Every structure is written in structure tokens, then in C-alpha cells.
Image (cartoon, rainbow, N blue to C red):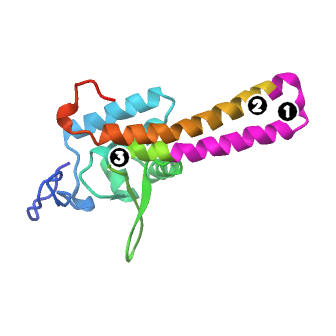
Amino acid sequence: MTHNPSGSAPASGEAGAEPSARPADLVLDASMAAWIESFASVWEVQQGRRMDGRVLGLLIIGDAPYLSSTDIARLLDASAGAVSMSTRALSQVGFIARHTVPGDRRHFYRVEDDVWGAFLLGERAYLRRMADVFRTGMQLEAGRSAGPRTRLRNADRYMRWLEDYHRKMVADWRAYRDMPDEAEGQDRP
């Protein structure tokens, strides 16, 4: 993202650096817009909504600590309603988070630097809720028949197994994420 030349801030990525632009100053250049659309296309192929992918892509590639829903709509040339639906959906599953600015009533959103690790942690809560739903299904009259009971039991066990495995995955992910960059390309754990 580029910004209006209103001062010089250190480039993002430098130690202690602030983002290079205030949210209202952000402008997408052609390469960023193309990357966002590419990200959204891949997102959509995996049964995600294209607009959700565009919003997440913008927050990932943007050099701003947070963006308002108005800024997101402006930058993506999207309707307020589409942005609202996407930010709600992405927030619910843990890809983005609401951000408050003291004295400002607008809705702001941000993405964690480790968005995928944050998603992995949030996914565990989803697995727990799904396991509860399957266990409830086994208590129903319909859930006592052989076929449904087997399917519900297998689903419950899968969710509980995956939830337990997430603990190991999170630890493995953090170790992998925190390896020095020069280790990339080598056999990693």
C-alpha cells in the first residue's frame, strides 16, 4: 500500500517501526490489488466466499495496524453490506478481530501477524462445539438407531481426536514458525 506523503515513518518490518500509513491514507497499487484478487480466488476454490477472501487478503497485505469497515469498502470498491457480512464471518471463525479506537464509534478490524496460528487456536473451540452437537444427537431417539448412531459416534470421536491433536499441532506450528529464515528450504521438523 502506498500512502499520501505527509511525513516519513520507518518502513514496516524495521525494529520498532510503525506502519507506513494511517488507515485513511491507504491506497492499493496495481500489484497489491492483483494479489488480493489472487488470494480471494484461491479462498473461493476452498468453498469460501470471494468477498471474505478479498477482505482477509487486504488486511494481510495492507501496511496498517487496522482498517475501518469504511476503509475496507473504499479500498476494495465494495458495498458496506458486503464488507459487513465478510467481517462478521471472518471474525466469527477467528481470521480477523474487531479493534476499538478510543473516542471513535466506527468498526475497525485487524489481522494478527500469525493469522493462521490464531485460526488454528480458534478452530479448537469449533471442534468442541461440534463434538457437543454430535453427542446431543446421540441422545435423540433418531440417534439411537444403528446407522445414525455409528455416524454420530464417529463424528464425535473425530472432533475430539482432532481437538486433542490441535494441541500438538499448535506447538509444532510455533516451533516451525519461529525457526530462523535461513533454515527455510532445509528439512524442517
Which image quarter is the C terminus in? top left
Q: Residues within 10 Å of mark 2 (few under 14, many from 20)?
A: many
**SS at mark 1?**
helix
> Mark 2 highlights which residue?
152
Amino acid type at circle 1 is: Gly
Mark drawn on residue 114:
3
**SS at mark 3?**
loop
Q: Main secondary structure of the magenta part?
A: helix
Residue 170, position in %: x, y?
A: 44, 41
Q: Is residue 147 left or right of residue 22?
A: right
Q: As drawn, which residue projects farthest toward the bottom?
A: 103
Residue 132, position in %: x, y?
A: 72, 44
Q: As drawn, which residue projects farthest toward the right?
A: 141
Between 101 and 149, the one lying in front of the other is 149
Q: Which residues are magenta?
A: 122-149
Residue 106, position in %: x, y?
A: 41, 67
Amino acid type at circle 2 is: Leu
Q: Residue at x 8, y 62 (%)?
A: 8
Give yes or no for contact between labels 1 and 2 (Cβ–Cβ under 8 Å).
Answer: yes
Using the rendered image of the protein, determine whether residue 55 is visible from the camera's viewpoint: no
Q: Is residue 108 left or right of residue 183?
A: right
**Image quadrant assignment for residue 131:** top right
> Mark 1 highlights which residue?
143
Give yes or no for contact between labels 1 and 3 (Cβ–Cβ under 8 Å).
Answer: no
Q: Residues within 10 Å of mark 1 (few under 14, many from 20)?
A: some
Q: Residue at x 37, y 75 (%)?
A: 102
